[in-house]
Amino acid sequence: MPDLMVIEESQFPEPWTKGMLIDEIANTENRRYTVAVEKKSLIGYLGLMFVLDELHVNTIGTLPGHEGRGVATSLLDDAWSDAFTRGIKRATLEVAVSNDRAIELYYRYGFKPVGVRKNYYERSMEDALVLWADLAIRA
Ligand SMILES: CC(C)(COP(=O)(O)OP(=O)(O)OC[C@H]1O[C@@H](n2cnc3c(N)ncnc32)[C@H](O)[C@@H]1OP(=O)(O)O)[C@@H](O)C(=O)NCCC(=O)NCCS
């Protein structure tokens, strides 16, 4: 948890609390949390939520200093493999409209914008893009 909180607090303007993350990870019924580890250090994590045959990317973060090295890509590749075995058909997520890095990454996985949630982020009042992907198609 301390390592996870370092990523959370350094990478998100509105970080989840330790309690929120523990609740997420403990919910094994419809959540899947995975981590990327290098030399025994946690350098990335990904949180998914499953609803029927859809998955929601709840959160993804890479430790600062380790970006652009394929950490998020490896986490998403693993998630997509798992999703296929679960019979997941579609995936969705929300991303801040200004988060170009993440949006570029998601587009590679076939995500496409379908709408905007106004003022989605409470502190910044920034809008979120709503993206959906058909898991049969990998961009
Ligand atoms: C978005 C994020 C998870 C990407 O993680 P990552 O481990 O750097 O991703 P990858 O290395 O797999 O890179 C995927 C692509 O994203 C882009 N990218 C990621 N980090 C980048 C960086 N530091 N500089 C430039 N481009 C970057 C590049 O296009 C990269 O492709 P490349 O292989 O050509 O470099 C990471 O930047 C992050 O933690 N951001 C803050 C948290 C966040 O915004 N999460 C998403 C919320 S919806």
Image: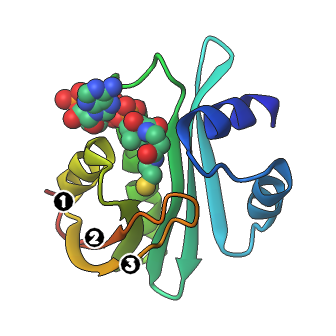
Q: Position of residue 79 (x, y in %)?
A: 45, 54
Give the structural element (helix, strand or loop) at label 2. Answer: loop
Rate crowding at label 1 as few (under 14), some (14 to 19) or many (20 or more) other CA atoms within 10 Å. few
Q: Position of residue 102 (x, y in %)?
A: 32, 47
Tag count: 3
Q: Position of residue 56 (x, y in %)?
A: 48, 71
Question: Under 8 Å from ligand 1: the CB of mark 3?
Answer: no
Residue 21 occupies which quadrant of the picture? bottom right
Please report the residue visible at 78 percent of the width from the left and 68 percent of the height from the top: 27
Image colouring: rainbow
Quadrant containing ligand 1:
top left
Residue located beneath label 3 in the image = 118
Which badge, 2 or 3, comes first in the chain's sequence? 3
Q: Is residue 133 above or below residue 95?
A: below
Using residue 49 as the reference point, say whether residue 29 is left or right of it.
right
What amino acid is at disc 3? Answer: Lys
CA gap between label 1 and label 2 equals 7 Å
Residue 5 occupies which quadrant of the picture? top right
Q: Position of residue 74 (x, y in %)?
A: 40, 37
Using residue 20 as the reference point, say whether residue 126 is left or right of it.
left
Would residue 70 be seen by someone viewing this image from the given angle?
Answer: no
Residue furthest top in the image: 39
Please report the residue visible at 56 percent of the width from the left and 76 percent of the height from the top: 50
Which quarter of the rendering shows the C terminus? bottom left
Foreground disc of the pair 3, 1:
3
Residue located beneath label 1 in the image = 138
Residue located beneath label 2 in the image = 135
What amino acid is at disc 2? Answer: Leu
Please report the residue visible at 54 percent of the width from the left and 37 percent of the height from the top: 11
Check whether the beta carbons of the residues at disc 2 and disc 3 lie within 8 A of each other.
no
